[in-house]
């Protein structure tokens, strides 16, 4: 970068936001992080992530909710971010059945406020988190960005589908370049306590049984956090072009015919059976898990699998950390963080 650019990272105290903000700081960006620090999971973990970011003098932490009227507008006005990476959201499939209203507030109203702020102070590129859950009941594997996505199974996924459409309309109306990320089960150090890896490791560590959904008949395209951050970083430099500036079409591109908007899978293209995932955790911990076999949970899907050919076409081949290495890194971080003897 010739001149220092400003990036706004929403959800900077969250799992992915923390890693993305850190990478952007390392790359010389000035970073504004926004986070509500809500108590969906352990707030101390969010504070610890934020504390690391704050040590960098070019990082500014702002506490607040996306949906708070004028907050984003004022942030955009003051800092004029050139890049926006929008990762704040109410995440989680299961919680969206218990508390759907929090998804309306954070994911729908919050997204609206973000788009309005961007309309007033246009960044050069906005990148926003969608999810593999958007593929819902689709059975064609691997999931490609140009597949129809009309059968969301959870309200969480429905709000993310709405986010893709909301972003598209603003990209079209106001010429704002926007990239949506469809993330596939992200894991790694500093990960979320509501996700399987964290839950399994803490249960094994504390001698509790782990809940194995759908009797273990599940597959997930696990994506290691460093690989994902590399993908996000490269996509920041790959904004979609509007209809007037197109070059040769890319096969399987989700690029809109009428707007500088595209949605991209970021996954590992290598689905792992839940049993193999658990075995890898047991191997890393040197301990066997006690297992409680359960039915499929409402809102969940039995398998995810990313077609990453569009991603590769756009930014080249990403590193693919193998599961054993990734899980070992997580277990090491977990034990160091929660002060447990190895
Ligand atoms: N982790 C995954 O495997 C995964 C997979 C698919 C999609 N995603 C999406 O990626 C994004 C980041 O996920 P994550 O795993 O880092 O989740 P996370 O919950 O760790 O991070 C989200 C952060 O946003 C903050 N936040 C929530 N609501 C807010 C609001 N209204 N205003 C301001 N801040 C708010 C939270 O406090 C949290 O720190 C989310 O949009 C999520 O839906 C994640």
Image: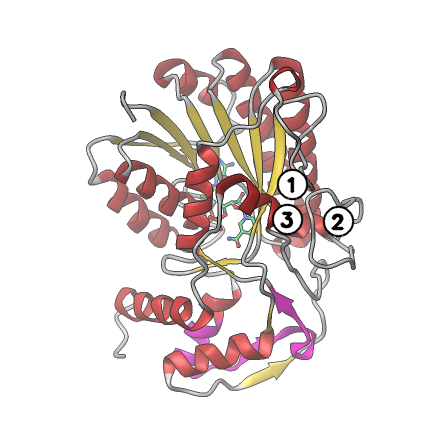
Disc 1 under 8 Å from ligand 1? The reply is: yes
Could you tell whether 144 is left or right of 58 in the image? right
Q: Nearer the viewer, residue 61 or 325?
A: 325
Mark 1–mark 2 CB contact (< 8 Å):
yes
- Circle 3 Cα neighbour tier, 10 Å, few/some/many (<14 / 14–19 / ≥20): few
Mark 3–mark 2 CB contact (< 8 Å):
no
- Residue topped by disc 2: 152
Whether residue 284 appears in this view of the structure is yes
Q: Quadrant of residue 198?
A: bottom left
Q: Which label belongs to residue 105?
A: none
Could you tell whether 22 is left or right of 69 in the image? left
The stretch of residues the image draws in magenta is 200-220
Q: Quadrant of residue 128?
A: top right
Instruction: Give the residue displayed 49% in from the left and 45% down from the top.
Output: 316
Q: Which label belongs to residue 160?
A: 1
Residue 272: percent from left, percent from top: 58, 70
Instruction: Give the residue displayed 63% in from the left and 55% down from the top.
Output: 306
Instruction: Give the residue displayed 54% in from the left and 47% down from the top.
Output: 312
Q: Secondary structure at mark 3?
A: loop
Residue 233: percent from left, percent from top: 41, 40
How many dots with numbers? 3
- Circle 2 Cα neighbour tier, 10 Å, few/some/many (<14 / 14–19 / ≥20): many
Instruction: Give the residue displayed 68% in from the left and 36% down from the top.
Output: 254
Q: Nearer the viewer, residue 134 or 239?
A: 239
- Residue topped by disc 3: 99
């Amino acid at each position: 970068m010739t001149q220092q650019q400003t990036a706004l990272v929403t959800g900077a105290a969250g799992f992915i936001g923390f890693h993305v903000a850190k990478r952007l700081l390392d790359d010389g960006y000035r970073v504004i992080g926004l986070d509500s620090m809500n108590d969906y999971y352990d707030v101390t973990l969010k504070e610890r992530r934020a504390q690391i970011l704050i040590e960098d003098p070019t990082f500014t932490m702002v506490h607040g909710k996306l949906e708070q009227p004028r907050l984003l507008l004022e942030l955009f006005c003051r800092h004029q971010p050139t890049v926006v990476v929008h990762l704040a959201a109410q995440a989680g499939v299961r919680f969206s059945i218990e508390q759907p209203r929090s998804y309306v507030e954070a994911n729908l109203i919050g997204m609206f406020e973000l788009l309005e702020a961007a309309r007033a102070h246009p960044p050069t590129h906005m990148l926003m988190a969608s999810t593999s859950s958007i593929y819902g009941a689709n059975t064609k594997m691997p999931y490609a960005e140009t597949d129809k996505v009309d059968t969301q199974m959870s309200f969480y996924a429905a709000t993310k589908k709405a986010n893709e459409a909301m972003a598209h309309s603003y990209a079209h109306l106001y010429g704002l370049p926007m990239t949506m990320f469809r993330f596939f089960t992200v894991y790694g150090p500093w990960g979320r306590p509501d996700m399987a890896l964290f839950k399994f490791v803490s249960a094994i560590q504390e001698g509790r049984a782990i809940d194995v959904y759908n009797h273990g008949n599940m597959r997930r395209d696990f994506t290691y956090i460093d690989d994902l951050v590399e993908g996000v970083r490269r996509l920041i430099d790959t904004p979609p072009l509007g209809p007037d500036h197109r070059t040769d079409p890319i096969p399987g591109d989700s690029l809109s015919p009428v707007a500088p908007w595209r949605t991209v899978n970021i996954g590992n293209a290598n689905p792992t059976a839940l049993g193999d995932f658990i075995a890898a955790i047991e191997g890393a911990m040197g301990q066997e898990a006690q297992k409680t076999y359960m039915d499929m949970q409402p809102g969940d899907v039995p398998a995810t699998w990313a077609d990453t050919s569009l991603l590769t076409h756009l930014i080249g081949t990403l590193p693919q950390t193998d599961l054993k290495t990734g899980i070992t890194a997580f277990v090491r971080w977990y034990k160091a963080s929660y002060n447990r003897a190895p």
